[in-house]
């Protein structure tokens, strides 16, 4: 199965850099890409893959470091995506992709969100809780999803 992991977020904003960190952790093991925000560029990056895994920091009221995971299905996840730390929702991007490029979009898109502890502009480094969650996400991806 041809897969890509896309990490989303800004490493200069504390825990928002979780997506960037998972890309660093997986480099060389699977195709990876880092984007600062969920833009339409995602569509170009996922073309031709069977599976796309999107990893991003979320703020949905869970305990810091908690992980949420679900498959992205057109029009079904609007409320879940509401807690992203960016302005354009992932659901809007993915839905647009399936409408415009149904033949080249991945058959499966999985979203993994890591609950932030703190997002602060110009603060480098991740909280302990998010660092631990990144280890778990890496293990989940390597052992269960990317096999």
Image (cartoon, grey):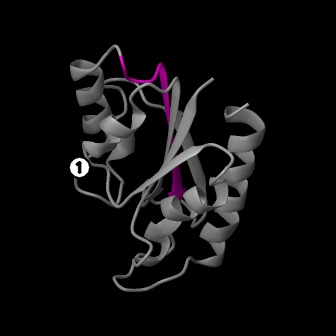
Q: Is residue 26 above or below residue 81?
A: below
Q: Quadrant of residue 11?
A: bottom left
Magenta span of residues: 104-115
Give the answer, above or below, for where 25 lies relative to 92. below
| Residue located farthest toward the front when viewing the structure as drawn | 28
Question: Which quadrant is home to the C terminus?
Answer: top right
Residue 7 at x, y percent in the picture? 48, 53
Side of 45 where 99 appears, left or right:
left
Find disc 1 in the rendering and name its residue.
88
- At 32% from the left and 32% from the top, the residue drawn is 94
> In the rendering, at what x and y percent does residue 52 appear?
50, 34
Residue 60 higher or lower than 128, as above or below:
above
> Relative to residue 124, is residue 85 drawn left or right?
left
Numbered disc 1: secondary structure: loop
Residue 78 point in image, percent of width and height? 31, 36
Question: For this view, does 96 lie left or right of residue 127?
Answer: left
Residue at 72%, 55% (x, y): give it: 136
* x and y, in percent, of residue 50 in the image: 52, 23
109 in magenta: yes
Characterize the magenta stretch by its predominant secondary structure: strand
Membership of 143 in magenta stretch: no
Left/right of residue 55 with respect to residue 67 in the rendered view: left
Residue lying at 43% horizontally and 30% vertically, measured from the top left: 72
């Amino acid at each position: 199965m041809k897969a890509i992991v896309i990490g989303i977020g800004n490493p200069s904003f504390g825990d928002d850099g979780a997506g960037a960190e998972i890309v660093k952790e997986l480099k060389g093991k699977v195709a990876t890409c880092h984007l600062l925000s969920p833009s339409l560029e995602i569509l170009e990056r996922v073309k031709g893959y069977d599976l796309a895994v999107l990893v991003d920091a979320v703020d949905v009221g869970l305990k810091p470091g908690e992980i949420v995971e679900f498959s992205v299905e057109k029009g079904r996840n609007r409320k879940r995506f509401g807690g992203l730390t960016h302005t354009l929702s992932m659901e809007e991007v993915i839905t647009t992709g399936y409408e415009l490029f149904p033949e080249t979009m991945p058959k499966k898109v999985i979203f993994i969100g890591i609950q932030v502890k703190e997002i602060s502009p110009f603060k480098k480094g991740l909280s302990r809780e998010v660092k631990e969650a990144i280890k778990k996400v890496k293990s989940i991806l390597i052992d269960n999803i990317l096999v």
